[in-house]
Image (cartoon, coloured by chain):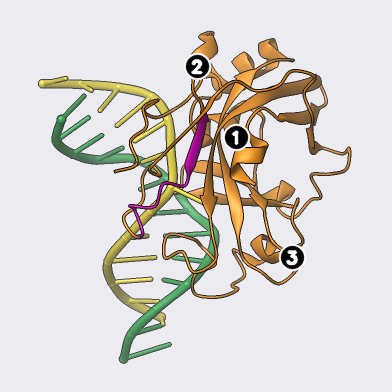
Chain colours: A orange, B yellow, C green
Amino acid sequence: MARYLIGKIVVRKLPEGIVSGRIVETEAYIVGDAAGHAYRGMTPRNRTLFLERGHAYVYLAYGISYMLNVSGGAKGIGTGVLIRALQPLEGIAIMQQNRGTERLPDLARGPGRLAQALRIDRRLDGIDLCQKGPLWLARDVHKPGDIGQGLRIGITKDADRPLRFFLYDSPFVSGPRSLNSR
DNA sequence: AGTGCGATTGACT
DNA sequence: GTCAATCGCACTA
């Protein structure tokens, strides 16, 4: 599913207008994964990770940055995909305002920046991303290019699993664009 | 009730 | 390259 989401579009509806971007980087957090938030079972924070696939799991990392995830399993299974970076498409002026920078590559390169650009916080936790609303996922008319795979970023446990995926030729990817899985 | 720690970012050397 | 900011929450007792 993390690979499948590469090239899909995240759409955010804001009062000022539509903001959207193409997913260029994802990470999978699978069942039995010590790096995954669901590893020790359901808690108040991670309960939406256990919703039917296609729901938003949003949490605050380091007290600073919100992270957008898509739940990835059947109902009751705690697994999901972290959306790490977008190529900005629509509403670039709004993203620039939300981020406080003009630079296109800095708008949504990294999960925290992405959430800030799209003004995503815990209020969106648990919403259905397969239905048009404040936040949803859409297909693109274009096929994505070559997809690279490598190690996940910023984790210490189960760090050697190659569960990070990225659009190989995209300058909007947050981490290394080399095949760095071992 | 107290404690320690991140699926990060931005500023700075 | 290093490092501090910042806070909700999971863990322990």
Q: Which residue is mark 1?
A: A115
Q: Earlier in the sequence, mark 2 or mark 1?
A: 1
Relative to A58, residue A16 above or below: above
Q: Quadrant of the C terminus of chain A?
A: top left
Q: Is residue A78 above or below residue A2?
A: below
- Dot 2 falls on which chain? A
The residue that mark 3 highlights is: A74
Q: Is residue A68 left or right of residue A20?
A: left
Q: Which mark is residue A169?
A: 2
Give the letter of the chain under mark 3.
Answer: A
Q: Name the residue located 39 percent from the left edge and 29 percent from the top edge.
A: A175
Asked whether the beta carbons under mark 2 and mark 1 sit within 8 Å of each other, the answer is no
- Residue A38 image offset from top left, x and y in percent: 54, 67
Provide the residue span drawn in magenta: A158-166
Q: Where's residue A85, x and y in %?
A: 55, 29
Taking the image as drawn, is residue A120 in sight?
A: no
Residue A177 quadrant:
top left
Q: Is residue A164 magenta?
A: yes
The Cα atoms of the two marked residues, 2 and 1, are separated by 23 Å
Horizontal and vertical percent position of residue A144: 65, 23
Confirm whether circles 3 and 2 share one chain.
Answer: yes
- Return the residue nearer the eye: A80 or A123: A80
Magenta highlight on residue A157: no
Q: Is residue A173 above or below residue A149?
A: above
Q: What secondary structure is marked by label 3?
A: loop
Question: What's the amino acid at mark 2?
Answer: Asp
Q: Which chain does tag 1 point to?
A: A
Identify which amino acid the numbered label 3 is placed on.
Ala
Mark nearer the N terminus (3 vs 2):
3
Same subunit, labels 2 and 1: the answer reads yes
Given contact means CB atoms under 8 Å apart, are the residues at marks 1 and 3 in contact?
no
Tell me: A135 left or right of A89: right
